Every structure is written in structure tokens, then in C-alpha cells.
Image (cartoon, rainbow, N blue to C red):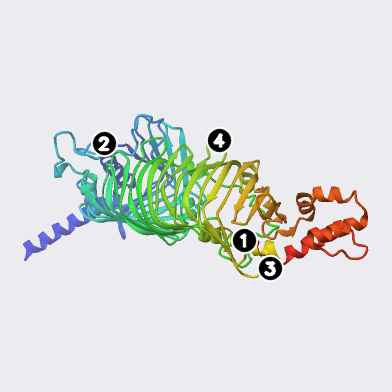
Amino acid sequence: MRWIVRAFGLLLLAVVLVAGVFLLLPGDKIAKVAAGQLSSWTGREVTMSGDTTLSFYPILGVSTGQVTVANADWTDGTPMFRAESLKIGVEMQALWGGDIRITGLEAEGPVINLEKASDGRVNWELGVEGVAPSGQAGEGTAPARSDRLALTLDRALIKDATLIYTDHGTGERTEMAGMAFDLRWPEYEGRATFDMTLRPAAEAVRIEGYLDRVGDFIDGAVSDVKATVSTEGGEVTFLGRASAAPEAQGRLTMAVADTGAFMASLGLPAAEIPAGLGRSVNGDTLVTYSADQRLSLREVALQLDGNRIGGAVDVALGGERPEVSAQINAGQLDLTRMGGESGSGESTGRATVAADQGWSTEPIDASALALANGEIALTAESVDLGDLKVGNVRSMITLDRSRLVFDLREVRAYKALITGNFVVNNRSGLSVGGDLKAAGIDMESFLTDAAGITRFSGEADASLSFLGVGASQQAIMESLSGKGAFQTGRGVISGIDLDKLMRSGVASGGTTIFDTMGATFTMENGFARNDDLLLQLPLAKAEGEGVVSLGKRRIDYLFTPILLEGESTKGLAIPVRIRGAWSDPEILPDMEAAIDRNFRDEKDELEDKAEEEVRRAVEKELGVELEEDESVEDALKRKLEEEATKGLLKLFE
């Protein structure tokens, strides 16, 4: 019994002595041990200075003053990490060496300085025994388990951090403040979870997820990973595998309600995305990123504002700007809102513009053309532009230094084959241009969609070349130059019989069958001029000439139907003047032009005769009974107005 009492007494004494050692152990000893272990782990000198407070409960740890982690030797010496205070909790065995198990790490207001040298070296590549600075195993050897870093972390909490990134090769310097980190890594070989808040711009960006096998990842192997990036604009999730090379492969899922806001939150350049082309993005794709900075997308299945697209994309990110090569397959593209929201008036199924609105003077943001270069092969089942509808599309899109070219290899629209090109150039100011040809356009459906004209049917061939320069719609339309032409074969004008109208003045119903119709026009400084419109009928024809102001949206056009009575007999021509705003033009018979065209010689001759002979001649020639005190000119005007108002204007309804 006495022996047992003595043994118990010796044990109690040992416990008291050990406890005393801990009670007398200075805080700077703990700090020194922690700093030494961290220096061994990172390969960088870690210093802890200032007042150091030791705690035993509920965890063993220290609260230090200023803490710094040294930078790479090729930098200017600014610490890679600096904090005014740091709290570290460790397990007891850390005092005697061995594995580090940090039970807690908390830093307030730290500054993290990341740098990239002009030769490509980065200061965050940390050297560990048995592990090369890149994180890969040393040449010809694999890191032995005893050489591997032995570190775990129950929780690291960092608040109000500042990140500074400097690229000495480009001179770029980026500073990001107001960041927060919550990292948990309880087992070296196990999973680490992270929850971070970054602020590349004003809005907060949250990144949360996990790295499944941290030890393997540190050794340069591949590990399962999940990361979700969330902003006010939406969220993007990556689920797959990655290594520190860096390399990654997995499924990328997007649910972005506002692409512009999402990009702005990430600090990316703002760009105006046309409606229907990705103001919102939903869907997923298989993504691969390789160490040579190449990004590949496969099994693309996305909805851009409701438009479904698929295909494959390859992007080289190592150059001055991304180089894109893509094959995009689309279904039925709805781009009806591409030109902006509709106005307040009722929709008619075609472009309707209030007379007092004019073209938009808002600056057009074409800066997105500078974001990348590339070639995109596009196919689509159909494209609905609102005013116009297009069928099958095969096009090659080339973007080179802010110049975008649509090479239309095959576009089926209104039963026609359309070929040519369309160019948007923003290299030195914005310009748009094109050279287009169409063969076999169905006039009835095309004119119905484009201008609301439903009377014409038949097929036409057309060509158009144009160029406009300016920073707004208004400026472009006022600068348009170029030329165009169209020519039809036999066709029909429904609802009116021009032959009958011209011969009898009766214009109710009927059909006009014409042989040909054609015209050419030129454009300069926003004015389109035509002087050779010809509509050829069996017993009549119609000619047209005039000017259309594309910039001011006004028209001044003279349309002249002419009755043909035979090769030796002069026909009757009744011109109609179309003048005013596009939205509501005034359409009236042009009496001055009618008299000058039809009766100039007769008028000059009759004026030399007596008044009574003039009256009889007019009555005989035209079948017009002159009223008392009515002049010959007034009688002619009255007769022409009566004929025109009987139905000629129905042609333009």
C-alpha cells in the first residue's frame, strides 16, 4: 500500500511539474514554434512580433502582434502576407514538433501581395521539402510520405482582407479590398471546404465549394473539386477535377439572369449584349482547361434569352487577346428584341416608327468587338428578326481586331437564296457595311413583313451594297452610301385593275397582271435616289422617280401610271406624289405634273385660239364639260382629280 501511495505521489508531482512548465512557458515560445513550423511548410520566413498572449483554454494558442510572410527573392521585398494581428490555435504536440494541427486561425485586415515576374514566375509557388516549387514532385522522384507537408486546419477565418496583384511583365496592378475567407481542412488527406467573398468591383462575389483530396492536390495530383460563383446577376458552378498545374475538367452549369451585371461584378469590361444573344444565360457544358491556357467547351447546351444553342468552342488564352474557334448549331433563333423594346404604339407585325421619334441618337457600344479574335461557323434552322424572317443559315463569322465579318454562305429567306457579307468595323470608329445578293425573293411575304404591303406577288432578284459610319443609329443612317437594284418577272397586283382604272376610272376590285418591274437606286449621305422605276403591264405602265431621306425618314416620290393606247397614240399619264414622313405620308395626284406631261403641247396650241374654240376643243379631246366661268386649266385639274380619287390610291394602301 505504501508503495502505491509513493507511486501516486510521484505521478502527481510529475503532473504538477508538467503543468508548471506550461504555466511558465512564455507566449513568444509558442509564437516561435508556430512561426518555425509555418516557415518550414511554406519555404518562406514567417515572423511574429509585438505582444504575444498565450491561451490554454478552450484551445492552446497565441494571439500575436504583427505577422509577415516573406516574399520571393526576386521581388522588391514587400511581404507576401502581412497582418497587424493574428490568432493561432494549435494542439499540444506542436510544442514538441511533429505534425501541425492548427485548430484555429483568425486574421483581421491582412494584406496579401501576389506578384508575377516578367519571365512568368509567380510568388505564390511555395517550396516544400520533397515538393518542387511548382507543386510537382522533384525530377525523377515522387515525394515520400514522410517528406510531405503535415498540416491540417480546423478553421481559418480571415476578415476584411486586401489582395494586391502585380504583373511585372505588363505593368498591370489590381487591388481588391473587403474580402473574407472561411477555410476548413480537418484532415490532410481529406476534403477542404471554402467560402470566400471577393470584390473585384463594387458588388460582392461569393465563391464556395470544396477540394476533395488536398494532400494529393498539393503533391501535383488531380483532385475532385466543386466551386460555385454567385453574384447579384446569377451563379456559375463547376463540378469536376482539377490540379495545381493549373488544369481542370468538368461540368460547368450556368444560371445567370443578368449577364451584364454578372460580368460587372467580376470586374470584366462592360459590354452591351443584344437581346436574344445572352443577356441571360442558362444551361451547361463540358469544360476542359489545360496548363497551356487553352479552354475547350464540348456538349454545349445553352439558352441565351430563350434561344437554344449547341456545338463546340476552343479558346486560346495565352495571347494578347483570346483566340476563339467555334462551331455553333442553333435551332430557331428569336432576335425580335435585338433592336430594343417596342414602342408604345400597337404592333403591326412590321417596323412601325412614330413620325416624331426618328432614329436613336444613343451611342452604340461596340467595345465587345475588341474582347477577342476568332472564327465561328454558325448554322441555324431559322432566324426571326421581327420585321424579317430567315430560314436555314450557314455563315462564317470572323472577328479580327474589332472587325466583325458575317460571310453569308447560304441564307434561305422568303424562298430566296441570299449570299454576300455584312461587316461591323470598330477599329477607328464604328462603321457598318455589306454586299448582299438575293435570288428568287417571294415579294408577297417579303413586302408584307418588311413594309406591310400585301398587294404584290411574284419573284424578284435584288442586290445591295452599302456603307454607313457613325456612333449612333442616327449618324449611320445619315451617312449611308451605296447602290442597289431589283428586277422581277411576271407578277400580280391584287385588289386593283390598273388597266380598267385608267380606261374607265373604275377601280373597285380586280387584279393587275404585270410583265416586269425593276428599278435601280443610289445612296449618298443618307439619301436614296431612284429615277428608273418601271412597272410594265400589257396595256399600261407605271414609272417612278424620287428621293428617300434615310436619315430623316422622309420620302418625296412621284409615281406615274400611264395608259397605253397604241404605238402611234399617246397614252394618258396621271402622276401621284408620295410625300412626307414614312409613318404617315401624304399621297395626292400631282396636277401640275399631269398637265405638263399630258397636255403641254395642246395647252400651248389652244391658248392661241379663241376662248370658245378652246372650250370646245377641251370638251372634245377630254370629254370634259367646262362649267361657266371655269378656266381650261381648272377643268383639267378637276377631271384628273376625279379619276385619281376613284381608286388609283388603293394601289398604295
Residues under labels 1 and 3: Cα distance?
A: 32 Å
Mark 4 and mark 2 in contact? Answer it, CB < 8 Å. Answer: no
Mark 1 and mark 4 in contact? Answer it, CB < 8 Å. Answer: no
Q: Is residue 59 left or right of residue 612?
A: left
Near mark 3 (Cα within 10 A), the count class, few <14, some 14-19 or many ≥20, is many
For marks 1 and 4, the one nearer the N-term is: 1
Q: Comparing marks 4 and 2, which lies closer to the viewer? A: 4
Q: Comparing marks 3 and 2, which lies closer to the viewer? A: 3
Residues under labels 3 and 4: Cα distance?
A: 59 Å
Which disc is residue 133 wearing?
2
The residue at which mark 4 appears reads as 428
Q: Is residue 312 left or right of residue 461?
A: left
Name the secondary structure under disc 3.
Answer: loop
For marks 3 and 4, the one nearer the N-term is: 4
Depth order, front residue of 438/280? 438
Q: Is residue 468 visible?
A: no
Which disc is residue 506 wearing?
3
